[in-house]
Image (tube, rainbow, N blue to C red):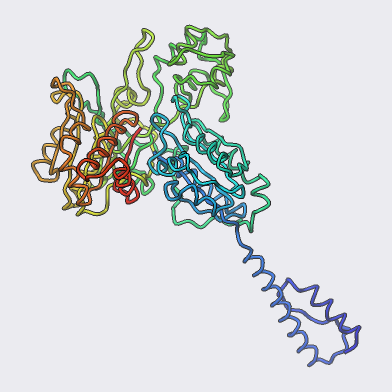
Amino acid sequence: MSEQLITELSSVIDANADSGTLIELPEGAPFDAEQRQWLNGLLTGISTIAAAAAGATQQEAPATPLAIFYGSQSGNCEVVSKDLKKHAATCGFEAKIEELNSITPADLAQHQHVLIVCSTFGEGEPPDNARQFYDLLMADDAAAIPASVNFSVCGLGDSSYTHFNKCASDINTRLQQLGATPCHDYIGCDAAFEDDVAEWKAGVFATPAFLDAAGAASTASVATTEKETLYTKNTPFIANLIESRNLSGEGSSKRVNHIEISLAGGGEDMEYHAGDALGVWPLNCPEEVSEILAAGGFSGKEVVQQKSGAATLRVLLQTRLDIHTVNAKCLEAWGLNEAPLNYKVFDVLNELKPELDAQTFVDGLRALQPRLYSIASSPKKHPGEVHLTVGEVHYDFNDKARKGVASTWLGNRLPAGNGVGVYVVKSEHFHITSNDDAPVIMIGPGTGIAPFRAFLEEREMREASGENWLFFGDQHKASDFLYRDEITAWQDSGVLNKTSLAWSRDTDRKIYVQTLIKDQGAEFFEWLERGAYIYICGDASRMAADVDSAIREVIAEHGSTDEAGANDYMNRLVSKHRYQRDVY
């Protein structure tokens, strides 16, 4: 074969190397018909093999590993983490999501790219599924972390709380102290976190540490076993209020309402399980809106701009904006350096009297946020409905009566039959065990009874054989015994095997649920030894902390161990999901 002919054949192969299609020799090639047919087949085969090899090489280019860790008490951080995983695939990373408690600080050395999303609750406390990691990280003897670990931290919080995003901020600072490399600035997001999270996410994957390491990006949708949810925080389902019924007796210092909402028409997207929460979009009180307008010298007819478009000031204040919270952003927007502690928007306008036009006023306000409530019903017992236990918030401040937004809207401003925007928040960290033979201990004073009404209904409908022990209490038995008739019926039927009731104002001795846990410590520990699951719901800063301490004392005393041993015992309960809390 001549050198010229070899050159011609090579050029034909090169021209079609990536096509994998039929190749034919040029008309002037010096071959007879049989030779041309054989060579055309040979060249087509070579081209097909080359194309397949090129495609395989491209497909086999690996995505870069990415570790995403989260600490979440209400579920928001887990939702953000799942979104990060989807986005990471489009940027050339294969992400794995885990709770922070699944690792130790020393384990981080195994990763080169790490993203952490963490919330804060109570008095600056880490979420339960991040507590062990947080304590190890903050310890004086925490292991050094190599500089090869590129990380960034995102905190989800609420600026109306004193310890705003403390946990995430602490983690970010400590990781740097231990030697890890921050590839992007830490971000602490407020209640309306979506825009800030999106900006942080885009920024992280645009950093050199991530751009230079990115593998093959996936342009297709990321495969997931989870179905996309139709009804979310930003696209709620319009449900209907069935009824709002007062549970508090005459003479109670509180008003607690039992709320029933119809989910008819919501389909699979509004299905829930015992332990889940319901997000509720409230409306502000019209009278409070009028007071704020008057204090600021506004008519309410002023037209102001929002991302979603223009609207009148009164409409925005009643439906879209937080008309109570004052934070640093508010003060900066309104040209103020500071405001007295606990001042609300009305107080700032009424007493500090900043000179504001309507647009500047609106620019300083936070967006109105949905409220999350523990679901107080089992769908097995109430199909097509969801029930809540909501205590109305009323208090006096600065010589003025104040009230909560959502609690009073649900309790007395929303008429039966009217619509309410809702969505289900799935709980991964707080759900009744599927082991129907296991004993269950439920601790929920006040409105903390809500999920345990759901748990007991669930266990009743499943005919679970495991024993159930309820700790409940409030101020007075006569006026604050929520769901008294239902609890009594469960006691009579044997669904509720043991009930410990604490009434803090009925005797000279202040008795709380934590008091009864210690008083009945021997039996409490015996239940734990038999495999009992502990569930706690209620106030994080006081009740939940006191209950946690009481349980540790019981373990130390009746387990014949010291404080370190009790903590190890509790850590084992947490790791086995036998200690779960829904606290706020």
> Is residue 499 left or right of 27 when viewed as pictured?
left
The C terminus sits in image quarter? top left
Image position of 143 with respect to 549: above or below: below
Image position of 156 with respect to 246: above or below: below
Q: How many marks?
A: 0
Residue 69: where, in percent of width, then height?
48, 47
Q: Nearer the viewer, residue 520 or 198?
A: 520
Which residue sits at x=18%, y=42%?
524
Q: Nearer the viewer, residue 581 or 572?
A: 572
Q: Is residue 461 visible?
A: yes
Instruction: State the image quarter where residue 369 is shown.
Output: top left
> Is residue 174 left or right of 13 when viewed as pictured?
left
Which residue sits at x=36%, y=26%?
406
The N terminus sits in image quarter? bottom right
> Is residue 356 left or right of 437 when viewed as pictured?
right
Residue 547: where, in percent of width, then height?
27, 34
Residue 252: where, in percent of width, then height?
19, 20
Image position of 442 with respect to 402: above or below: below
Residue 143: where, in percent of width, then height?
51, 46
Which residue sits at x=59%, y=52%?
112
Q: Is residue 457 visible?
A: no
Image position of 352 with respect to 494: above or below: above
